[in-house]
Amino acid sequence: KAGVTQTPRYLIKTRGQQVTLSCSPISGHRSVSWYQQTPGQGLQFLFEYFSETQRNKGNFPGRFSGRQFSNSRSEMNVSTLELGDSALYLCASSLAKGTGEADTQYFGPGTRLTVL
Amino acid sequence: AQSVAQPEDQVNVAEGNPLTVKCTYSVSGNPYLFWYVQYPNRGLQFLLKYITGDNLVKGSYGFEAEFNKSQTSFHLKKPSALVSDSALYFCAVRGLRGSQGNLIFGKGTKLSVKP
């Protein structure tokens, strides 16, 4: 079974631009979560989508948004990019049976975003 | 609020020796605990998780973790380290619904295994 895939793998943008990242979950997985990884803040939860609905949200500004499609694929968007948005953005998928707390999240390779 | 702490930024071990990467947790309710490993320029790979039951959890690549409720710890262990185990290890706890609704990670521990 194919793993979680993320596109693009690398991205360079300038301040003020916007960016869209894509994530395809493992087949059959219904939940997709996004995380930001930086050297200073570590791994931080952005949001989770389940059945096209945002189920949980981390403490990030409204410039960060996402959506999930009917095939469970997900996109996240960052508008008005800032230098501090440079990070590795990781997507994870899980089966999300029941309430989901015990589900294992499987991560993709990430998208490395550099903001100049 | 749910949280985990990894007290060591780096652990150095000689190949063939046992290794331990430490993790302590603070949770409300039942703890759902996870260990992940990250190799350079890669995503996170799942190693193991504790949900309930046996305190010793066996995972991938020969790793295991011991859940200790009284010490609120979930240390990762391996009887004999390999050079290829050198990587960044993350302990995580499942958050509560809402703003902490997903995995909350520790800062990570860099494991270095020398030949």
Image: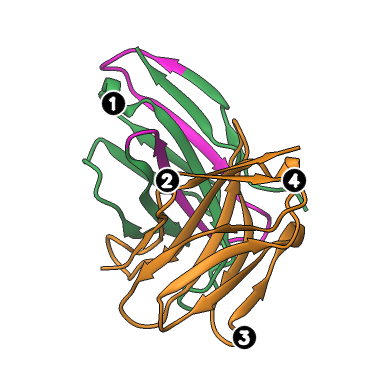
Q: Gap between marks 3 and 4, in whole Å?
A: 28 Å
- Residue occupied by mark 4: B15
Contact (CB < 8 A) between labels 3 and 4? no
Which structural element holds mark 2? Answer: strand
Which of the two residues, A65 or B79, is positioned nearer the viewer here? B79
Kindly indicate whether the residues beneath marks 3 and 1 are on one polypeptide chain: no
- Residue occupied by mark 3: B54
Vertical position of residue A30 compared to residue A80: above or below: below
**Residue A16 at x, y = what percent?**
26, 17
Q: Which color is chain B depicted in?
A: orange
Which structural element holds mark 1? Answer: helix
Which of the two residues, A76 or B32, is positioned nearer the viewer here? B32
Q: Callout 1, which amino acid?
A: Gly
Q: Residues within 10 Å of mark 3 (few under 14, many from 20)?
A: few
Q: Residues within 10 Å of mark 2 (few under 14, many from 20)?
A: many
Q: Residues within 10 Å of mark 4 (few under 14, many from 20)?
A: some
Vertical position of residue A9 compared to residue A26: above or below: above
Kindly indicate whether the residues beneath marks 3 and 4 are on one polypeptide chain: yes
Report the side of B80 relative to B99 (left or right). right
Colour-to-chain, green: A
Q: Gap between marks 2 and 1, in whole Å?
A: 15 Å
Q: Residue at x 49, y 27 (%)?
A: A112
Contact (CB < 8 A) between labels 2 and 1? no
**Residue A30 at x, y = what percent?**
55, 61
- Residue occupied by mark 1: A84
